[in-house]
Amino acid sequence: MKVAIVAPTYNEAESVPLLVQEVDRALSGVDYELLIADDDSPDRTWAVAQELATRSPQIRVLRRTADRGLSPAVMEAFLASSSKYVGVIDADLQHDPKILREMIEALDAGAEIVVGSRYTKGGGTGKWSGVRRFQSWLATRLAQGFVGVELTDPMSGYFMLRRADFDRINRQLDVRGFKILLEIIARLAPSSVVEIPYTFRQRAVGESKMSSKVVLQFLAQIWRLSSVSRYRSVRLIKFALVGGFGTVVNLCAFSILAWSLGVRDWRISALATLFVNVTNYIFADAWAFVDRRRSGLSLAKRYLSYLASSFIGLTTSTLAFAGVQQAFERGWHARESFALAVATQLVAILIGSVLNFEISSQLSRRRSGETDGKAQPRSKTTQSDLISAEEEKDHAPLLPKKLTT
């Protein structure tokens, strides 16, 4: 058999018949099976699927009464298949089945994992609200930053890979992870990942399974994956500590300057932020990267490069301070409140740090050859130009080596 498509379900009785129709239409002429892995749904989704299976030989039903959950369902269905390729699709019709054939073709062409992406060129999130977009953006950045997954859409639950590759790593996968794709990529370390764009569709029927428990599972998952990957590096731990120390230094410098000069506006914020930019660089060079220390003109030149890369973030911090302070002044007279001014500086630091991270990520992609949504073989680059390519090679086994969109 060519491919087994797994649809994990729970209370999806209304959407399963529609899913069957769309998958059959998309894979007409392909030797496939659709595995409905149902967690013994109270609405008897499994019974609806079994009825459909009597009329369609491509449908197979796994009624699961133990070890429930999305990841365990996917893993059990993968192991129950005998196909060359295995893939996952949501049963709620938010994943567009039209790209299934293209995903199969990408595997035929040599890709190790194919991911349906909402964020690569040509993809989209449909009619999401601003809050939903922000939640997705934040989760994506957490996965990219902590786990080191080089995908535009690491939160995707729509993907396909070879069954043989899954067999090699299935015993290493932790079923507690809500996003099984993160587990698979972290363990498989594929050399070629292809992202295929699609537009996330509105849910046809049913309700979202998102809950506070799911959020906590996701946070636990990325923390666990990061603890066994590149963030175990002593050098990277040092680098993170430098950043935390820099925040404390920034607030102390701001407090001293504001108190001694009697000024609590954007000028003091800018001076404190520039001061910590210098101290962070020197501290990082002397401690976190002691084996690559520079001196004299070489140190100064590298600092200028570092300053240039972080200039937008520094400017944003200052503008953020001015903007937040102006809002506070209307009701709380921030110029007269020392504690509030310090709190405003902390907010400004966080905003500037987030933007700096985004800029560094974009620069890393550009330096690695990514253009117009297509990327050449990547080599890991830097966080604010301080982590070198040699450092990243130490962590290569858990990261994709090539990404194509």
Image (cartoon, grey):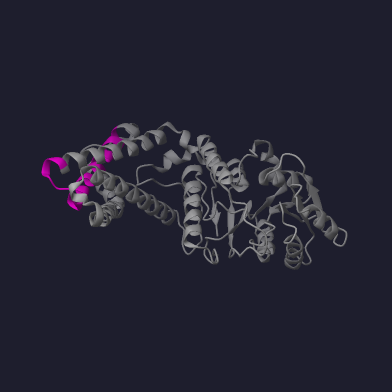
- Whether residue 322 can be seen here: no
Q: Quadrant of residue 118?
A: bottom right
Q: Is residue 106 left or right of residue 133?
A: right
Point out residue 268 in the picture as x, y percentages from the top left corner: 18, 48
In the image, is residue 263 part of the stretch drawn in magenta? Answer: yes
- The residue at 36%/53% (across/down) is 355
Q: Nearer the viewer, residue 388 or 228?
A: 228
- Whether residue 374 can be seen here: yes
Q: Is residue 260 left or right of residue 36?
A: left
Q: Quadrant of the C terminus?
A: bottom right
In the image, is residue 82 part of the stretch drawn in magenta? Answer: no
Q: Nearer the viewer, residue 325 or 176?
A: 325
Q: Is residue 300 left or right of residue 377?
A: left
- The residue at 16%/43% (across/down) is 258
Query: From the viewer's perspective, is residue 130 above or below residue 272?
Result: below
Q: Nearer the viewer, residue 259 or 193?
A: 259
Q: Quadrant of residue 322?
A: bottom left
Q: Is residue 3 left or right of residue 180?
A: right
Q: Residue furthest front?
A: 331
Q: Quadrant of residue 68?
A: top right
Q: Which residues are magenta?
A: 259-286
Point out residue 275 in the picture as x, y percentages from the top left corner: 21, 43
Number of numbered discs visible in the structure rendering: 0
Q: Main secondary structure of the magenta part?
A: helix
Q: Nearer the viewer, residue 108 or 224?
A: 224
- The residue at 72%/56% (across/down) is 12
